[in-house]
Image (spheres, helix red, strand yellow):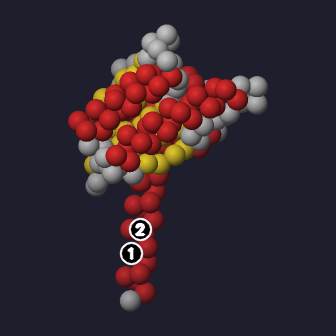
Amino acid sequence: MIILGVDPGFGITGYGLVECRPEDFSRPSLVEAGILKTPKDLPLGGRLLQIYDGLRKLICEFRPGAVAVEDIFSVHGFPRSAILIGHIRGTALLAAAQESVPVFSYYPLQVKKALIGNGNATKVQVQRMVQTVLGLDAPPRPDDLSDALAVALCHAGHLRIDRKLRTAGALEAGVRA
C-alpha cells in the first residue's frame, strides 16, 4: 500500500509517498517526496488551486491507499496562520475525497510520539528518524518535506499495529474454538 503524507503549509506544502508491503508494514520505503510551493503574490484562491492540482496529480499518478494529513496545530498568538493552514488542509481533503481515497489526520504530537516516542521531539530528531526508517543518505529537507514523510510513516505505524491486533484477535479466536 502506498501512503501519501501531507504537511499542509500556506507557503510550502510538503508531500511524501511511502510504500508498505502488506506482509511487512514495518519496512516502509520511499516512493517520492517533494514540496508544492505557491507564489506569494498569487491570491488565496489561486494558491489553493495550485496546491489542489499538485495533490490531485500525485493521487492520480501514484494511487495511494490512504492519505495522512497533519492536523492543525494552532499557537495562541497566530490564529490567522491556523485559518490559512485550514484552507490548505481542506484542499488536501477534497483532492483525496474526489479520488475516493480515505484520509487520516494526525496532530504533530501524535506523529512525533509515533516516530520518536516523545511528543516533544525536535524537528532535527524527526528528520533523523525519517532518514533512519527510510534508509536515506541524509535527513530530508526542508522541514515541510520531512514532516509529510513523518505523517505517512505515522500512519504506516498505525496500520502495522492494527494488523497485529487483528492477527492476535484471530489467533485468540482460534484458540477458543
* Proximity of marks 1 and 2: CB atoms separated by less than 8 Å: yes
**In which image quadrant can residue 172 be found?**
bottom left
Tell me the number on the disc at residue 73: none
Amino acid carrying mark 2 in the image: Arg
Q: Would you name the residue on which mark 1 appears?
A: 170
Density class for disc 1 (Cα within 10 Å; few <14, some 14-19, many ≥20) is few
Q: From the top left corner, tell me how far across and down residue 4 is, in percent.
A: 37, 39
Q: Residue at x 34, y 46 (%)?
A: 98
Q: Is residue 146 visible?
A: no
Q: Would you name the residue on which mark 2 appears?
A: 166
Q: CA distance from mark 1 to mark 2?
A: 6 Å
43 lies left or right of 96:
right
Q: Is residue 169 visible?
A: yes
Q: From the top left corner, tell me how far across and down residue 21 is, in percent.
A: 28, 49
Image height of 130 relative to 113, above or below: above
Density class for disc 2 (Cα within 10 Å; few <14, some 14-19, many ≥20) is few
Q: Residue at x 43, y 73 (%)?
A: 169
Q: Residue at x 76, y 25 (%)?
A: 77
Image height of 27 relative to 48, above or below: below
User: Secondary structure under badge 1?
Assistant: helix
